[in-house]
């Protein structure tokens, strides 16, 4: 028998409890249990005026932003609409059925004003790190670092050449109302630029042109993660231009900041070859006393059958190299009136063999067949590189290589699940805001999973 709905919607009074409509195992209910925003209003108080109309509740804005990044809702217009319609979102935002959701334009204006001035997103992120530490999810023994390129909100066609002079005061795309915030931030940091890039975006000039092999170039930013390898908790996050040197400097900043804010310094740092430069290894070994579980960036090895740099023995006491035939390579073959350091601007020392020795050597064809004499370049930080090479030969390094995949999995989750494959905000502050919120959402999701749905003991041991 075909049934028919006989009820009507003309009932005058309803009894409705929003608390009962959110399942006990809902993700937002778990996140709410570990989210601490108790100090939010006190931190923002200096940035609000005592006069004028009441503004949007800052805790409401943070909760709405966290919903957007946890559920990959990138549009602020759509986020406001989803919070208005979804009962679980309303419950998490502490909104009743009769409460009004902020208008998307008002939401955007408030988000990009006081929140940046107070750097409140960084404080919310650090509170999630502190919660992870209190819950025992941070080991503090090993950290892993890496960077991933995110496409900027900039069109490749809308650019100028790096060497061209451009009048930024007009504010391209702003109708002559002055430069945009992204342009102002770029001009503020222009003095720190060593050399102009090949191409500069007119909409987001601080971003950098980059491209993967076989793919078209695009303007992008790098999100840098520093994670604890015990449970892949993100200890720090930083935005940087898509440059290798900027990635390395961002890692230094993050390690120093974690040590300063939380009192934690790892015993070992895991990274790929980008962090295996001589300067970075020396910083880890000599200054921070951290074991570099990083492949050494080494161009001294040869694959053409001739002797590599490692075939030459170094004597630190006499500052000399000895070739496989027993002849010595010296930095200076004569005495100078003024003593020279022998160190180049790149932090390297150059050792040369005697042409007389090389001409009479029976191993010349295996050493320097196309040169009069052999030359060897050695870094002033070679001792730190040797430490890294020794670690590279240990079983612990092989385990570190497996641990490094945890940070790569976070980037895959960031792009494929949270849908952060292209930025919506521009400039350094825009990239900072988006990357910080995304890292906060990832930490909160991990807390919700591990605290309320703990892994089996066998998985935790692994």
Image: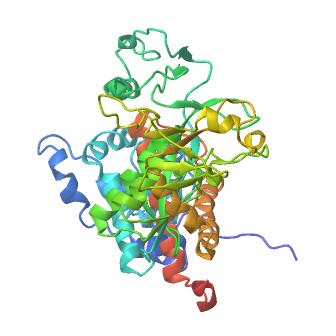
- Which one is in front, 272 or 216? 272
Number of marks present in the image shown: 0
Residue 116 location (% of width, % of height):
31, 43
Query: Is residue 436 shown to the viewer in this render?
Result: no
Residue 191 location (% of width, % of height):
33, 24
Residue 451 location (% of width, % of height):
48, 81
Residue 73 location (% of width, % of height):
55, 50
Asked which quadrant contains residue 211, the reply is top right
Left or right, 270 with respect to 309, comes to left
Query: Is residue 192 shown to the viewer in this render?
Result: yes
Residue displayed at 44% across by 8% down: 165
Judge whether 175 appears above or below 150 on screen: above
Q: Quadrant of the N terminus?
A: bottom right
Left or right, 351 with respect to 167, comes to right
- Which one is in front, 37 or 230? 230
Residue sitting farthest toward the left: 50
Left or right, 233 with respect to 367, comes to left
Judge whether 456 appears above or below 171 on screen: below
- Which one is in front, 442 or 340? 340
- Which one is in front, 354 or 207? 354
Asked which quadrant contains residue 256, the reply is bottom left
Q: Quadrant of the C terminus?
A: bottom right
Residue displayed at 69% across by 30% down: 371
Residue displayed at 40% across by 37% down: 342
């Amino acid at each position: 028998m075909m049934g028919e709905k006989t009820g009507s919607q003309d009932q005058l009074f309803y009894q409705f409890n929003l608390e009962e409509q959110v399942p006990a195992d809902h993700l937002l209910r778990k996140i709410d249990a570990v989210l601490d925003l108790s100090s939010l209003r006190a931190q923002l108080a200096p940035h609000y005026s005592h006069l004028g109309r009441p503004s949007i509740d800052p805790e409401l804005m943070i909760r709405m932003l966290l919903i957007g990044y946890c559920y990959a809702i990138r549009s602020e217009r759509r986020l406001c609409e989803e919070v208005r319609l979804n009962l679980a979102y309303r419950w998490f935002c502490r909104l009743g059925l009769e409460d009004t959701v902020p208008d998307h334009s008002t939401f955007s204006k408030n988000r990009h004003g006081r929140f940046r001035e107070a750097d409140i997103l960084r404080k919310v992120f650090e509170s999630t790190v502190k919660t992870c530490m209190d819950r025992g999810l941070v080991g503090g023994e090993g950290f892993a670092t890496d960077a991933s390129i995110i496409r900027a909100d900039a069109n490749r066609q809308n650019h100028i050449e790096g060497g061209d002079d451009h009048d930024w005061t007009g504010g391209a795309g702003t109708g002559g109302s002055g430069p945009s915030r992204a342009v102002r931030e770029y001009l503020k940091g222009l003095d720190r630029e060593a050399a102009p890039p090949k191409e500069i975006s007119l909409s987001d000039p601080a971003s950098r042109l980059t491209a993967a092999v076989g793919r078209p170039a695009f303007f992008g930013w790098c999100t840098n993660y520093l994670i604890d390898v015990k449970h892949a908790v993100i200890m720090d996050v930083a935005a940087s231009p898509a440059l290798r040197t900027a990635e390395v400097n961002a890692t230094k900043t993050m390690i120093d900041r974690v040590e300063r804010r939380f009192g934690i310094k790892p015993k070992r740092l895991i990274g790929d070859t980008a962090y295996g430069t001589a300067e970075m290894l020396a910083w880890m070994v000599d200054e921070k006393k951290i074991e570099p579980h990083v492949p050494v960036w080494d161009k001294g090895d040869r694959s053409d059958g001739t002797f590599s740099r490692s075939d030459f023995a170094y004597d630190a006491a006499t500052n000399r190299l000895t070739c496989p035939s027993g002849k010595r390579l010296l930095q200076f073959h004569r005495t100078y009136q003024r003593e020279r350091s022998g160190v180049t601007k790149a932090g390297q020392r150059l050792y040369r063999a005697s042409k007389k020795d090389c001409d009479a050597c029976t191993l010349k064809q295996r050493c320097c067949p196309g040169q009069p004499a052999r030359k060897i370049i050695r870094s002033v930080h070679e001792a730190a590189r040797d430490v890294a090479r020794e670690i590279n030969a240990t079983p612990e390094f092989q385990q570190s290589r497996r641990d490094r995949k945890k940070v790569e999995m976070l980037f895959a989750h960031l792009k494929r699940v949270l849908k952060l494959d292209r930025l919506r905000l521009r400039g350094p502050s825009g990239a900072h805001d988006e990357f910080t919120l995304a890292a906060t959402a990832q930490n909160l999701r991990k807390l919700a999973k591990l605290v309320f749905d703990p892994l089996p003991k066998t998985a935790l041991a692994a």
